[in-house]
Image (cartoon, rainbow, N blue to C red):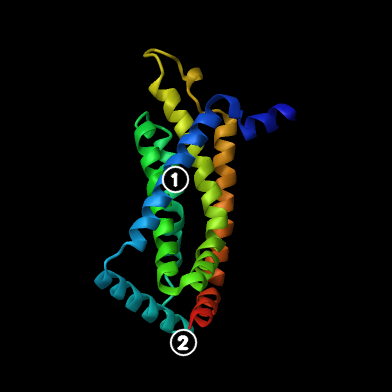
Amino acid sequence: MRRAVTGFWWSPTTQGTPALVVTAAFFTFGVLVGSLLALQVTEGGAEALNAYLEQFLALAQAGELTQPSFFTLMWRAIRWPLFAFLLGFSALGVLFLPILSSMRGFFLAFSIASFARSYARRGVAISFLLLGVPEAVYLPVFFLLCVQSLGAAWSLAGRIPGQGRRELPYDRGYFLRCGVCTVAMAVGLFIEWAALPTLMAGVAGGLT
């Protein structure tokens, strides 16, 4: 039992810590760039962004906002962890996983900073409410998959030609963690899909 639990949580003293540091560093870099870019939008771009947000919130408050289909929401939710998972099966993940992590941080921070620029402190609070509810599930899943995939990609990049399958970095714990992430994503996706219309209307009411 103890061995199974240890295998599931993955030893942070081997690949875990370096991969986590790299993933977090590139994610933070993306957050900083996204925030600065959103706050330095030109006057014309800022007016266009404000107009779009005002129209979006007006439709949401009136209950006339068209809810995305379940499959659209599903793709938006799973694309980041899916790419992180797939890149773990190639040595190229050493290069592309940090880039993926920085892009994830960039788009998330750009969205939050855009609300902050348009609605000041209320925009920050409500953007965290709007984005933070699903991201409370999606971000930990992304980080876990990204970190373990980066560790696997490093192992593949350092493999000696002719090594057998036993040296591959995919054990039972690897796929067990992927299964737990899949269940978590399914729960988060259902909550987002079921609560999105009410959440949108409440956010719009708070800002207008």
Percent of width and height locating residue 73: 44, 63
- Secondary structure type for disc 1: helix
First in sequence: mark 2 or mark 1? 1
Percent of width and height locating residue 71: 43, 62
Q: Is residue 55 left or right of residue 168?
A: left
- Secondary structure type for disc 2: loop
In terms of depth relative to the viewer, which is nearer, 8 or 99? 99
Which residue type does callout 1 highlight?
Answer: Phe
Residue extending farthest to the left is: 44
Percent of width and height locating residue 82: 43, 46
Which residue type does callout 2 highlight?
Answer: Ala
Q: Is residue 172 left or right of residue 47?
A: right
Q: Which residue is mark 1?
A: 27
Residue in the image at 50% along x and 75% along y: 200
Residue in the image at 49% along x and 33% along y: 19
Mark 2–mark 1 distance (CA, rounded to whole Å): 36 Å
Q: Considering only vertical position in the picture, is 68 above or below 147? A: below
In terms of depth relative to the viewer, which is nearer, 108 or 199? 108
Asked whether residue 26 appears in the rendered view, the answer is: yes
Q: Which residue is mark 2?
A: 62
Q: Quadrant of residue 125?
A: bottom right
Residue in the image at 34% along x and 32% along y: 92
Residue 201's tag is none
